[in-house]
Amino acid sequence: MNAPAFTTEEVMTVAAARMLKNGAVCFVGIGLPSTAANLARLTHAPDLVLIYESGPIGAKPHVLPLSIGDGNLAETADTVVSTPEIFQYWLQGGRIGIGFLGAAQIDRYANINTTVIGDYRKPKTRLPGAGGAPEIAACAGEIFIILRHSKRAFVEKLDFITSVGHLDGGDARRRLGLSGKGPTAVITDLCILEPDPETKELVVTHLHAGIAREQVQEATGWPIRFAAEVRETAAPTASELEALRDLQRRTAEAHGRA
Amino acid sequence: MAELTSLRDAIASLIHDGDTVAMEGFTHLIPFAAGYEVIRQQRRNLTLVRMTPDLIYDQLIGAGCARKLVFSWGGNPGVGSLHRLRDAVEKGWPHPLEIEEHSHAALANAYVAGASNLPFAVFRGYTGSDLPKYNDRIRFIRCPFTGEELAAVPSVRPDVAVIHAQKADRKGNVLLWGILGVQKEAVLAAKRAIVTVEEIVDDLNAAPNACILPSWVVTAVCHVPGGAQPSYAMGYYERDNRFYQEWDDIARTRESFQAWIKRHVLDTEDFEAFKRVLRESARREVA
């Protein structure tokens, strides 16, 4: 057998990109979400609207932004508004269909920690903090989360809930008065997970090609559940891979990391 | 009316020990030169407010200027951690740093409330998050009309706001464009405002809806070309991503940080001298 022609990281990014439908309005976090969202825009979803919390609405960057406020986002946007306006009119105003987030840690109900490892007042590791995520998680129509799968990331109990997913499961979001659906998909470099319709616990619905169930369990800090029917994630197409690699090459050149 | 003055004079007369200072700029137009001058003049016990502390507050915190930090996302964008901020929070070096931590939506709303002369901001936020458990300045109130529960945070009312902008005219009217962040709100929320600019021109030639801060809401305007580097100023220069990456090494240890601050900031007379020494350092690295 030849080595696969793509990496699991590429499968993750492509799988996430495919979930973004053409014409959707997506509030994008920096890093992996931004990569997937821009790949979607450059492939099947040219009219995907990308909104970044720094103010650009309808950004169409030529290269991936290194920071949330890169000039390329402003130059290519339909309009640039102030940061208060982004959060007040556009996010809180209910204009965002999809919030696309990354995470340092996640639990079985897709709650997210980006604040601290260890005790908040005596932290073992201080992470950057909330940014826009708590309100994106609360106000967007639905949430996609993308992160690499590991035992350090998929934990039994979060040290800190920065942004709420399905809290303790079931109808918790409704009880909290949250309008959006919350996390509907978690995309990793091993698999795709979706919340159980009733309990809201994350279950594996797709495994990437060549990934065994044991590998997912090995990289998850709780006994992971699998859907009754687990499918294989469709492999990236040649054109998707080409678009992704071109984007990453352009980005590396632009940011002086070639 | 804004006074056109040197950055040294502006910092000396307008920022005092113990002040609450908001140096804003969301990735774009971060007033770095003003931050260096605050370090140079060795201000102490400042309460620093900023949505994204970025390198500018990493420097001020490491240099011992801050007593408290109010913030909502504290990383080195695109690179990783702010090591001086982490050292202060995790190890109390150079001295313990009190933190008041929010989300972006909360702080953005708090600046708007400050500019609007309101005591607090109200918004939909923090639901289900643990942040309210650790920050008692996040509270929840009931809407008097619908009974809905909403989040409330106190407004930000800084003693001094510091921002960088592209242009000012000779009267001190200020024009900025591109990613605007919360700069306008920060200036209007503050008692005093210092604006550093790339250029001073005869006529701003601004469109009717441009972001203008009239001279009479600004206290001092300082001509400091390059004053937002290593962040960027749209229309003038790009973000110095390489420096943001280098900062990861510079700030990683206390010794390398202190050596950098001494050589580039404490031992230089002003921002022009700083730029000269920084260029020498870059040349030395290449050689």
Image (tube, coloured by chain):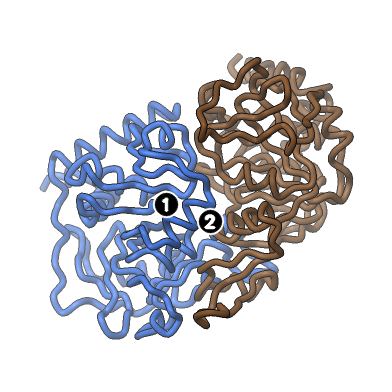
Chain colours: A blue, B brown
In the rendered structure, the answer to whether residue A9 lies left or right of residue A89 reads: left
| Front position in the image: B199 or A155 | B199
Q: Amino acid at mark 2?
A: Gly
* Chain for numbered disc 2: A
Residue at horizontal 31 percent and vertical 77 percent from the top:
A224
Residue A93 in the image: state x and y as whole percent. Answer: 42, 61
| Front position in the image: A123 or B224 | B224
Q: Quadrant of residue B181?
A: top right
Residue B57 visible? The answer is no
For disc 2, the neighbor class at 10 Å (few under 14, some 14 to 19, many from 20) is: many
Task: Specify the quadrant that holds the C terminus of chain A.
Answer: top left
A255 w.r.t. A110: above or below: above
Residue A233 in the image: state x and y as whole percent. Answer: 17, 59
Q: Quadrant of residue B132?
A: bottom right
Residue at horizontal 87 percent and vertical 46 percent from the top:
B44
Q: Dot 1 corresponds to which residue? A: A29
Q: Quadrant of residue B1?
A: top right
In the rendered structure, the answer to whether residue A148 lies left or right of residue A120 reads: left
For disc 1, the neighbor class at 10 Å (few under 14, some 14 to 19, many from 20) is: many
Residue A252 in the image: state x and y as whole percent. Answer: 38, 31
Local secondary structure at mark 2: loop
Q: CA distance from mark 2 to mark 1?
A: 9 Å
Local secondary structure at mark 1: loop
* Chain for numbered disc 1: A
The residue positioned farthest toward the front in the image shown: B208
Q: Which disc is residue A105 wearing?
A: none
Verify CB contact (< 8 Å) between mark 2 and mark 1. yes
In the rendered structure, the answer to whether residue B187 lies left or right of residue B28 reads: right
Q: Amino acid at mark 1?
A: Gly
Residue B260 in the image: state x and y as whole percent. Answer: 74, 31
Q: Which disc is residue A131 wearing?
A: 2
Residue at horizontal 38 percent and vertical 26 percent from the top:
A253
